[in-house]
Structures are given as structure tokens and as C-alpha cells.
Amino acid sequence: MATLLSERGAQASWRDYLELTKPKVVLLMLITSLVGMFLATRAGVPWTVLLFGNLGIALCAGGAAAINHVVDRRIDSVMARTHKRPLAEGRVAPGAAILFALLLAVAGMSLLLTFTNALAAWLTLASLVGYAVVYTGFLKRATPQNIVIGGLAGAAPPLLGWVAVTGQITAEPLLLVLIIFAWTPPHFWALAIHRKDEYAKVNVPMLPVTHGEHYTKVHILLYTAMLLAVSVMPFAIHMSGVLYLAAAVLLGARFLFWAVVLYRDSRPHAAIKTFKFSIWYLFALFIALLVDHYLPLTF
């Protein structure tokens, strides 16, 4: 095994393998998974579920990310944003990365089956396959709606956290999935506009490449408006209170502001600024959900 892991990648360091897992992406996923866990109960999450459940989800997500590196290595070597990735530069061999991904997935599934429940484990596996195989292996190169369809896999973490605690799928975690599902297109299309020339160069049919920037900006605006509407639904179904509602409206209005700025192209580097704000938006929205759950405001 050690020989295989070092094949064509003798110069690889532990940082290269860590980079294969896309740790910043996984961290954001874990925040939403944690929120899903804590929203599922007021009685407290068992420490074994909290620790090993999130570790299992993180390992599976890291395994899916490593497969993404393998499949996209030729594209990554051309694009400025990704050309220094471990596989793109040859520091890690494809075979070693696949073995690494398999080890992560097996370890993650083992932890989930041992410390949570079978439903949480199999949903996590489905999410892994959805991202690593369906999205990365097929949808990304097949349709400009790739991120819309494939976004369902990336929207799963709050559901996984909820199910890890309760063992059940209910309306509340599905609503959390819907929020991330609506968030994903404006989040990623803003980046795709910023990197349009690079996607065109590698023949990936991202929406700005196939339909133009104006068309994409209109859809970012529409999806952001839809996201604002979806984000207030937890309050509408009495899942959250006034504190969350205020945060959702303020954050959504700010996101909509950036979508309008991008549509009008009224500020320099509007696309990448919209993308960056979208990350903070999701983080703040889910933190607001969590705070409201344990410190509700009453009038």
C-alpha cells in the first residue's frame, strides 16, 4: 500500500493529500451538518454522534473531493485557479489519489454505521456517489445545468446531520437541503462568470460559456430571489423564530444587492465579489438558524 501511495508521487506531502479533500469546502459542509444535528433536538447531541458522525461525513466528503481531483486533473492543469493542484502538477499519482479516496470513504462509512445509523450512512454514500460520479463524471461535461442538477449532492449535509441524530427524514431537514439547493446556482455561476474564459478553454459547458454572461446574470438574479423566498420558510413553518427571520431577510437582501450589482456590472470584479459574499451568506444563515434554535426571541 505504501508503494502504491507513493507511485509517481514520491514528492507528495501530507499537505498534498489534505488538499485533495478540499478542506475549505468540507469545512463549510460540516458547519451545515453540525447545524442539522443541533436543530434536530433540544436534548443535546450525543458526543459520539457529534464527533464520529461529523468525522464520518467529512471523510466521505473528502473522498468524493479526491475523486473530483482525479477526474478533473487535465482540466485543472489548464485553469489558472486549479493548475497547482497536486494531481495537475503530478505531485500525486491518479492511482494513489483513488486509493486515498477509497480509504477515506470506507473509514467514513464505517464510522457512520458504527456510531450513527444505517440511514445516515447510506444517504452519505449516495451524496458521495452523486458528487464524485454523477456530477463530476457526467453532468459537469454534459449540460450547462450541471450545477443545478448536481447541486443536490452538495446540499445534503444538513440532512445527513439531522438523520445522524434522529434516524428519520422529516420536512425540516429537507427544507435545509432546499435552501442550499437554491443557493448553489447563484453561488457557482458567479464564479463561472469570473472564470468564463477558462471554462471555455477546457470545453466545460458552464452557463456563461454556452448562453452568455447576460443570460447567466439574469438567472443568478432569479435564483437569488428564489433563495430569499425559500430562506424565510423555516419561520413560516415555525421551525425558527424572529431572530432567524431578521437574519434571513437581511442576508437575503444583501445577496440580492450583489446579484443586482452583478447584473448591472456596476462595480469592478462584481462576479468574484458576489461569489465570495455567497460563502459568507450561507455560513451566517446557518449560524443564525442555530442561535435562534437555542436563544429564541419572544414578543
Image (cartoon, grey):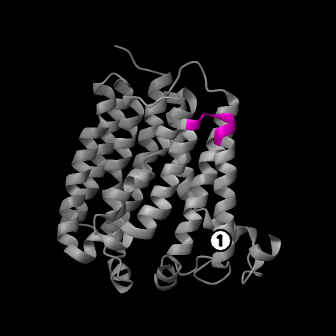
Q: Is residue 275 left or right of residue 75?
A: left
The residue identified by callout 1 is 97
Tell me the quarter of the picture where residue 193 sits.
Answer: bottom left
Where does the image place residue 50, in percent across and percent down from the top left? 64, 34
Q: Give residue 62's position: percent from left, percent from top.
A: 60, 58
Tell me if 212 is positioned left or right of 232 in this view: left
Residue 264 or 1: which is nearer the viewer?
1
Quadrant for the C terminus, please: top left
- Give neighbour class at mark 1: few <14, some 14-19, many 20+ (Cα, 10 Å): many
Instruction: Name the residue at 53% across, 57% down.
Output: 25
As drawn, 201 above or below 23: below
> Is residue 268 visible from the viewing direction of this image?
no
Give the residues drawn in magenta, as a range: 112-118
Q: Is residue 162 above or below residue 297?
A: below
How many marks overall?
A: 1
> Looking at the magenta stretch, what is its main secondary structure?
helix
Question: From the image, which quarter does the N terminus lie in?
Answer: bottom right
Can you give x and y, in whole percent of width and height, for residue 87 in the image? Answer: 61, 78
Q: Is residue 139 above or below residue 94?
A: above
Residue 247, given in percent of the width and then of the height, sits at 36, 36
Q: Is residue 245 visible?
A: yes
Give the vertical position of 113 relative to 65 (above or below): above
Residue at the top extreme of this rendering: 299
Left or right, 292 with respect to 161, comes to: left
Residue at screen point 50% across, 83% down = 74
Task: Confirm whether the magenta stretch covers residue 114.
Answer: yes
Residue type marked 1: Ala
* Magenta highlight on residue 55: no
Looking at the rendered structure, the secondary structure element under dot 1 is helix
Instruction: Return the residue nearer the eye: 37 or 293.
Output: 37
